[in-house]
Image (tube, grey):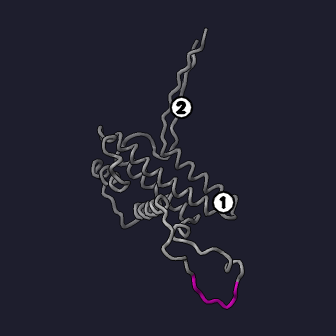
Amino acid sequence: MPTKVKKERDYRPHAEVLFSARMLIKMGEVHRENCSHLWLASLVLTAFAFEGYLNYLGRRLFRTWEDFERKLNWDMKASLIADRIDLTLDRGKPPLQTICELFHFRNNVAHLKPPLKPLVEEYETDNLDLSTFYRPIESKVEKFCTEANAKLCIEDVQKMMSIFYEHAKIGGEPTILGSQSGTASG
């Protein structure tokens, strides 16, 4: 007789992606050399996680979310949800200020454009350090890819998710991975 298996998972993609962003930071803490690529990936995933959480809430708050959510950017989604749950957003201070900077970065990465002119760096020094001299000039995108920014963005995204969660009182804790259960009979 065959065994009948039934499994169910509370899949929270925003929490999964945020977990991945945290793992990239841990990798960078272990492998210190040339970590900017890990920070970049962590930052982009952190932005994805926040927008994913907005979509998670939006589906629960608006019956027709799927009909219009693709037409809204993350900021519009946040405003619409905040209005629905009676939450006042302050873009002028953290954590939302940090998230605004994160999405500015994410948009720059998503729509990369080479500079119109070569990058230039000029400075005076009394002690020419060859390691500094041969270090590439960084673009704005590259300058944002630091461990400190990656950690701050995760921290502030988690804070903002918690604020939305406390006001909405919908779904599970936003940064906790979903659970899975199953049965087998036969």
Residue 137 shown left or right of residue 114 in the figure: right
- The crowd level at tag 1 (other Cα within 10 Å; few <14, some 14-19, many 20+) is few
Magenta residues (range): 121-128
> Residue lying farthest right?
130
Q: Mark 1 is on which residue type?
A: Glu
> Residue lying farthest bottom?
126
123 in relation to 176, above or below: below
**In the drawing, what numbered circle is on residue 128?**
none
For mark 1, what is the residue? 29
Residue 159 shown left or right of residue 42 in the figure: left
Q: Is residue 132 magenta?
A: no
x and y, in percent, of residue 79 in the image: 31, 54
**In the drawing, what numbered circle is on residue 180?**
2
Q: Mark 2 is on which residue type?
A: Gln
- Give me the C-alpha separation between circle 2 and circle 1: 31 Å
x and y, in percent, of residue 139 in the image: 54, 71
